[in-house]
Amino acid sequence: MKRKILIVEDLFVEANHLRIMLKRAGYEVTGIARTFEEAVSLIRQHPPGIVLLDIFLAGKKTGIDLAGVLNQQHIPFLYLSANSSEEVLKQAKATRPSGFIVKPFREKDLLVSLEIAEYLHENSSESQLRQEANFQLEVKQLLQSENEWAGQMLGIVKALQKLISFDYAAVGFMGTRHLPFNALHFLRTGFDEYQVMDSEGIQTVWNIRKDEMDALLKATPVDPRTQFYNDERFREMASGNSIRKLVAAKFGMRSNLTIPYPDISMDGQFFFISLYSRRPGAFSGNDLELCDRIQAPLEHIVKEMTGRTSAAFPQVRLGKSVGIVAGNRDAENSFKGMIGQSHLLLNVFNLINQVAGTDTSVLVTGESGTGKERVADNIHSLSSRKNKPFVKVNCAALPISLIESELFGHEKGAFTGATAKRIGRFEQANGGTIFLDEIGDMPAEIQMKLLRVLQQREIERLGGTETIKIDIRVIAATNRNLERAIAEGKFRLDLYYRLNVFPIVMPSLRERRDDIELLVNHFIGYFSRKIGKAVDGVSEKVLKALTDYDWPGNIRELENVIERSVLLARSNIIDQISLPANSTPTNEPSTPEPTFKNIFENERDHIIAVLKACEGRISGENGAAKVLAIPATTLGSKMKKLGIKRHIGVT
Ligand SMILES: Nc1ncnc2c1ncn2[C@@H]1O[C@H](COP(=O)(O)OP(=O)(O)OP(=O)(O)O)[C@@H](O)[C@H]1O
């Protein structure tokens, strides 16, 4: 049965044309609205199954405003849009639409996009429901485990992490005199690993006395409603003299979601779960809805736990120890080749874990050398396609004349020189995953063809007449700002939308300096084994220099620096390192990259800086190519393309 559709479009001719197309395809059009207000009233009278939404409408309010209403009512929608500015696209994207159709479009594109939107909507609600059902099962199983109270609370924290991403949790009854029920604190230290602190542990970590702790507890009332506090609200909420202030200050938290359970109380205090994140703006209205849905089952389980604990484990204490690390260290190894514990990387692990089991397309963005390919590799390895091919295509490395036959294959005689049939990369990846690296460099005509493959899951070899069905999972990556490329007309919005179903943003190494030491030790171990030299570590001075450096080439650059240092090391401790001069003062706090330079300008500036530091040398051991971790020939052609003269580099 076809769904009911509402068209929200202020241009009568376009709206009417759409209506005819949709009716012909068997959809029921519930109405045409020209303004926000008309749309709201039509939605109330005839609730649609899906909405086609123009961004700019007659009247003051836009399609983006209407998207907020639709999200609240869980009605999927697709934007209809001519290419818009980057800012508008950013706002539109933030409303999580189920698709984007770029005007002008063909009837077939419209219908396929609608089908995809319906599929995605159902799929995402289905996968959400599946995750929530798994959560319920997981917490129920905690009742059967031998764990005492702290173990059970840790179990709840771990199960919650799969639904909501956070870095710190406080769970229990605030300020109760009954042990062990008073709040336990859990600091996330690895993918599935937490440092557990009871109230004595917290006192030690915060260096406060018991009476000070009691005063803080008194000053930290728990709101009986589930609430989230991001940014300014969080700063306000954490400004009073309370436990929250200490958590925020001590562990650098920037958002909070507090989930109270007023129906479970002890000493007049109710049970609560308080989640903190280091990311600003980490929580949203969706989390409130989610908490609402899991409230009843969680309440039931916690009541059971509370009842059983008081009977079976009276006065169970965690002891005085601080830093009980509880968790599954092996889980970290399940992300192969990805070293790090910073909250930004742990969040990436969460995302990989969430998406791996589905067939959803993933778009990995981030600067060069941040580990985008590693992410793709891990998603494939953790998916049910793991025993099938993982095919990597570097879209930037392929000459335009070859890219089509490389991707889609060709029949014998398809063009001059096609002396034999060739199976393309899509066909090679059948059953498995295709990784399209540097997708932002894909030529426009291939973008169109790629869109068809993604929508219809079929290809035709060049010069062939047969349509070949393919079953692939697509992961794409780029270090370009695709939104800007779209605004400049260089990248198709509909393709972007089709790829960006599940975005993963890789943090730069500058943003996760706390991982540098781990990475340094990891690479020293790796290269000393590989090269056969006994190198054990770096001196404090070198570690400081490595931690302060800005790493424009990210992990790849760090890897190269360590490889070179291990090669040159004269003792088992590396006590000298040569790094290009930092573009920013070393001891300034890391700040996000300014967004006003485009990628070429950034690349140009960076190459010039490295050339200067290398005194104009391009190749060789001390040359810029080595520092930039690219072949000297590639550097030469980049310099030519970006108009950089070699002597610029020489001071
Ligand atoms: N978390 C990590 N731990 C250890 N090594 C890593 C990690 N992430 C990436 N690497 C290493 O850093 C190098 C760069 O990683 P990768 O090729 O995945 O980056 P990328 O973002 O895809 O780069 P590009 O944009 O240039 O294609 C590789 O040698 C990879 O093994």
Image (cartoon, grey):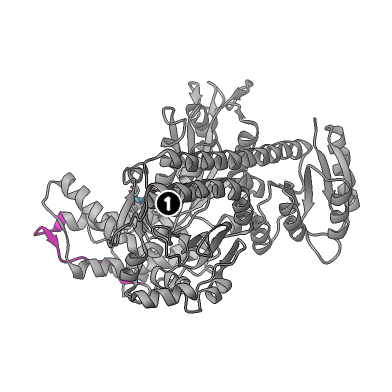
Where does the C terminus fall, quadrant-wise? bottom left
Residue at 78% over, 51% down: 53
Q: Quadrant of the N terminus?
A: top right
Residue range (magenta): 567-582
Give the percent coordinates (x, y) of residue 447.
60, 42
Q: Is residue 424 above or below residue 420?
A: below
| Image quadrant assignment for residue 287 | bottom right
Residue 627 is at least partly visible in this image:
yes
Q: Residues within 10 Å of mark 1 (few under 14, many from 20)?
A: some
Is residue 316 one of those drawn in magenta?
no
Q: Quadrant of residue 590?
A: bottom left
Magenta stretch holds residue 580: yes
Identify the residue position indicated by label 1 in the image: 310
In the displayed structure image, the side of residue 344 where residue 647 appears, left or right: left
Residue at the limit of the structure toward the front, as seen here = 311
Q: Main secondary structure of the magenta part?
A: loop
Of 292 and 12, the residue lying toward us:
292
Mark 1: amino acid:
Ser
For the view shown, which residue lies furthest in the left direction? 571
- Numbered-mark total: 1
Instruction: Looking at the picture, tell me which residue is in the foreground, 158 or 571.
Output: 158
Q: Position of residue 608 (x, y in %)?
A: 38, 67
Residue name at image x 52 percent, y 66 percent: 255
Q: Nearer the viewer, residue 188 or 40?
A: 188
The verdict on label 1 being within 8 Å of ligand 1 is: no
Q: Provide residue 126's location: percent of width, then percent of height.
A: 62, 38
Question: Residue at position x 54%, y 62% from top?
Answer: 258
Relative image position of residue 509 (x, y in whole percent): 38, 61
Callout 1: helix, strand or loop? helix
Q: Is residue 189 left or right of residue 279?
A: left
Is residue 191 among what the camera can see?
no
In-front residue for pair 321/432: 321
